[in-house]
Image: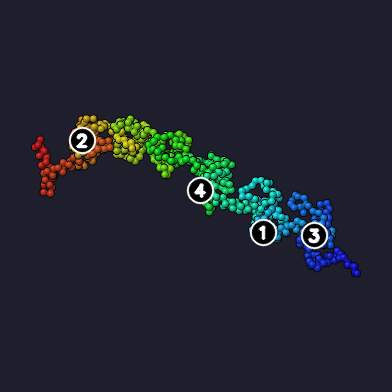
Amino acid sequence: MATQVQPTRDDFAAMLDDMFGGADSFEGRVVHGTVTAIENDMAVIDVGLKSEGRVPLREFAPAPGQKAELKVGDEVEVYVDRVENMHGEAMLSRDRARREAAWDKLEVEFAKTARVEGTIFGRVKGGFTVDLSGAVAFLPGSQVDIRPVRDVTPLMDLPQPFQILKMDRKRGNIVVSRRAVLEETRAEQRSGLIQSLAEGQIIDGVVKNITDYGAFVDLGGIDGLLHVTDLSYKRVNHPSEMINIGDTVKVQIIRINKDTQRISLGMKQLESDPWDGAQAKYPVGAKLSGRVTNITEYGAFVELEAGIEGLVHVSEMSWTKKNVHPGKIVSTSQEVEVVVLEVDSDKRRISLGLKQAQNNPWDAFLAAHPVGSTVEGEVKNATEFGLFIGLDGDVDGMVHMSDIAWGVSGEDALALHRKGEMVQAVVLDIDAEKERISLGMKQLERGGVAAPGAASVNKNQVVTVTVLEVRDQGLEVQQGDDGATGFIKRTDLGRDRDEQRPERFQVGQKFDAMVTGFDRSKKPTFSIKAMQISEEKQAVAQYGSSDSGASLGDILGAALKAQTEKK
């Protein structure tokens, strides 16, 4: 019986060459091997080549930092870098074998956009390194969490899911994201949580963030916005005045937008509305006390009670200060008295008046200075139509240019006075409702208005007057001995031009004139010319018409004769 010859090592290598196409075909492949020995920190592995290879034990550790559990006889997979090095040994790598196997698996998972499990084990510039079962991936810092994370230590060496964003096997480049997984998970949680919530529901939440316009409250996996206007019925300038980050608050769900997954919350809705019954609590005309909470260009807001504010418009702030910024009349936090002007509960508006809570200076002036009294004040301003005089009570009165001086044109009269000058005037009229005081300065000149008890005159009445003063512009005259004084303009001294000469009259001379009207101070104005025209019309009507052939001289002569015969 022939003896069976056992194949030698060379025979086995030849068979491998026949199977794989030569020893060189081993390079760059993952092959099975057997641990033949463990020397110090190296494992000796036989993969069927001419020589064995050595692989560090740490490459067989299940995870970085752990100890390898390997013994002689174990079957392992390794990667053949080179069939033989300069020492005649095969160059093997367990890490490369693991990476190659991991890449194959990751490519399949990446194609399916599935999550993969990995462990963050190191920090590099711009991010972190992640072990994906042997393949090393890059985790950018922005992809660690939904919000910036200051300390990543609690996440290190902890197996957790990741999403592959990009991978390139040729370059050995893999980019993963933990944030994408969290966002997807949160979206699923938010969707489920939103389905369980309902508008009007009262729920507890934790304040996560505070901004100028409100606060974000965590409702157990989904955030809702608590706007600053829904914190309280009273004015809140900043949410931090009422809540702090980390506070547990009870809120009501106001609105839910399931499309955008946005939730609006409110705290004031859990309180009683102070506007209920506001119309009865604050009747029009009521005088109240309040605190100034805000000042704008158009007025000031006054808080009457927590949650109820009224507006004092700039026009209702002061009787005398016009076109002044409200901040120059009141200040924030100042306690003021106001009067309710209007209440609109539907629009949640109350109109208030500040000046109405104070005495009307126009009424006070009328009580202290009735019409006809003399006042003194400073010329505050001169306009094209008169002078404004500062009076008691911080009010102004106006002297129209026609009431500045007798016998002087308005423009010339205005030039007689300057700003800052102290003058005296007579009160001609007071209209408290329109806030107007009419003054006259010329009425303080000789004669003044008619003395009490003196005979009154009517328009178109012919009266006898006495010349008090002869001026270039005309005559100042007085009716009777104690009547009112008036003025006859130069053009009213006669019909003919040669009669319109003031110098032909003398002081004390008496003559008849017609009352043509009254000025702003109710003083009569006279005219000789108007009287002559009126007498002429009467004569024509009584004694004939010039159309009948009679001359005007004949008619006036007949009228004069008839008047003489009557005497």
Residue visible at 40% across and 38% down?
280
Of the numbered discs in the image, which one, if any, rests on residue 109? 1
Helix, strand or loop at mark 2: loop
Q: Nearer the viewer, residue 36 or 439?
A: 36
Labels 1, 4: front one: 4
Residue visible at 19% across and 39% down?
460
Helix, strand or loop at mark 4: loop
Mark 3 is surrounded, within 10 Å at the Cα level, by few (under 14), some (14 to 19) or many (20 or more) other residues, namely many
Three-letter amino acid code of the residue under disc 4: Glu
Labels 2, 3: front one: 3
In what quadrant of the picture does the C terminus appear?
top left
Labels 1, 2: front one: 1
Report, in whole angstroms, how far the alpha carbon at label 2 lies from the one at label 3.
141 Å
- Residue 448, can we see it? yes
Helix, strand or loop at mark 1: helix
Counting residues from the start of the chain, the first of labels 1 and 2 encountered is 1
Residue 77: x %, y % from top left:
77, 59
- Residue 553, can we see it? no
Q: How is the image coloured?
A: rainbow
Q: Which residue is mark 4?
A: 199
Q: Which residue is mark 3?
A: 33
Report, in whole angstroms, how far the alpha carbon at label 2 lies from the one at label 4.
83 Å
Residue visible at 39% across and 40% down?
342
Q: Which residue is mark 2?
A: 457
- Quarter of image, res 559: top left
Mark 1 is surrounded, within 10 Å at the Cα level, by few (under 14), some (14 to 19) or many (20 or more) other residues, namely some
Of the numbered discs in the image, which one, if any, rests on residue 566? none
> Would you say 16 lies left or right of 465 here?
right
In what quadrant of the picture does the N terminus appear?
bottom right
Three-letter amino acid code of the residue under disc 3: Gly
Mark 2 is surrounded, within 10 Å at the Cα level, by few (under 14), some (14 to 19) or many (20 or more) other residues, namely some
